[in-house]
Image (cartoon, grey):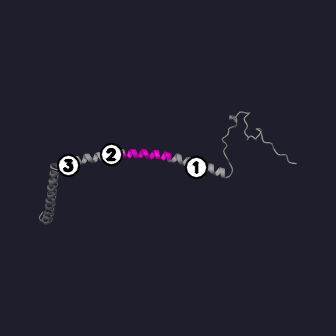
Amino acid sequence: MALFGNKESAEIASLHQQLAAANGTVTELRSWVNQLRGTQAPALEAELRLLKTAVDQAKREYAALTSSRHQTQAELDALQARLIETRETALLQEVGVYETRIHLRTHSPTRRLWPTCARGSRPRRRRTR
């Protein structure tokens, strides 16, 4: 053991220094714990309650905004569908295709579907010679 004594004593001295530094850190942490337990604990608890209330309020607002966003998205989808339908109708009308809204079966057979003349009869065709 005499051959390794110098090396071991240097390691032991280094370990003693590390232990003293760790004890100093522990002492400092204990003083912080005692300080936090004493005077600041009620203030911290009150702040924690306020923060929990704020978090709950933020969660409620988030839920309301999410619901509103879904409703707005549904309205937007409906409007986009109507816009596409309107554009298609306009394009078809541009090329001369019109949708008729008169259903012939709903009209009585005696009802005239053509405009009446001054005499109340069907317009006559002109004879060509």
Q: Position of residue 12 (x, y in %)?
A: 14, 61
Q: Which residue is mark 2?
A: 57
Q: Quadrant of the N terminus?
A: bottom left
Q: Is residue 46 above or below residue 20?
A: above
Q: Is residue 95 above or below residue 124?
A: below
| Gap in angstroms between the C-alphas marked 1 and 2 | 40 Å
Looking at the rendering, the stretch of residues picked out in magenta corresponds to: 61-75
Q: Amino acid at mark 1?
A: Ile
| Gap in angstroms between the C-alphas marked 3 and 2 | 21 Å
Decide: few, some or many residues near mark 3? Use Cα within 10 Å; few <14, some 14-19, many ≥20: few
Looking at the image, residue 17 sits to the left or right of residue 91; the answer is: left
Q: Position of residue 111 (x, y in %)?
A: 72, 35
Say if mark 1 contacts mark 3, CB within 8 Å.
no
Specify whether residue 68 is painted magenta: yes
What residue is shown at x 27% (from left), y 48% (from top)? 51
Q: Which residue is mark 1?
A: 84
**Residue occupying the far left of the picture:** 2
Decide: few, some or many residues near mark 2? Use Cα within 10 Å; few <14, some 14-19, many ≥20: few
Q: Mark 1 or 3 closer to N-term? A: 3
Q: Position of residue 23 (x, y in %)?
A: 14, 57
Specify whether residue 42 is painted magenta: no
Q: Which residue is mark 3?
A: 43
Q: Secondary structure at mark 3?
A: helix
